[in-house]
Structures are given as C-alpha cells and as structure tokens.
Image (spheres, rainbow, N blue to C red):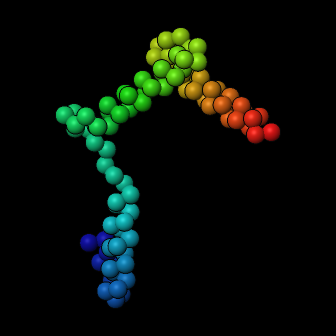
Amino acid sequence: MQCKQVTKGRDAQVEQMIRSITAWQLDLIAPKNFETADPDNYVKRIELSFENVCTALEELGVKDPAELTVFQFYNKVVYFEKKKIKQQTERRR
C-alpha cells in the first residue's frame, strides 16, 4: 500500500524497484529468536555471552564479575579492551 502511495503516477519499473529495496531492507532486520525450546534462542545466547565475559574477567583477576554493577562491569570490560589494544600496538613497534 505504501508503494502505491509513493509511486502514484509512476511506472511499474519504479514500483518494482521500491518493492525490491524494501524487501532487501526487511531481510537485513532478522527477528530475534525468543523461542525457549530452541537451544539457540536470543536469551540463552546473551546469557552464554555474559558468562563467557565473566570467565574472561575472572581469568584477568576480577573477583565475582557477575556481582558487579552494570557500570563497574562495563568499565572493566572497556579497560581490558583498551589494555589489549595498547599491548598489540606496542608489539607492532
């Protein structure tokens, strides 16, 4: 319906192009999978990712990273990311 409003009075080729672009854009926005029965659902992936980051922080000496506030957790992640980049830059020299 929106295509018809935009292309009113235009030829079918333009309308088809707009539909094609719209379909392409919609394909870029894949919906998140919240199906709890699916082992690859979005919530489980987020939880696993969080646990992986917590494990990495523990290996770096952070005690109980899961107990940190959001700000503290984020700050530590950013700190170690910057530290890693600095170390990589120094190695290249």
Say whether residue 79 is left or right of residue 54.
Answer: right
Nearest the eye: 14 or 62: 62
Q: Residue 18: which quarter of the image?
A: bottom left
In the image, residue 63 above or below residue 71: above
Say whether residue 35 is left or right of residue 26.
Answer: left
Q: Residue at x 75, y 35 (%)?
A: 91
In the image, residue 31 above or below residue 4: above
Q: Whole-percent x and y of residue 60?
A: 58, 18
Q: Residue at x 71, y 31 (%)?
A: 87
Q: Whole-percent x and y of residue 28?
A: 38, 57
Q: Residue 76: which quarter of the image?
A: top right
Q: Whole-percent x and y of residue 72?
A: 56, 20
| The C terminus - image quarter | top right
Q: Whole-percent x and y of residue 25?
A: 38, 63
Say whether residue 38 is left or right of residue 7.
Answer: left
Q: Residue at x 32, y 37 (%)?
A: 42
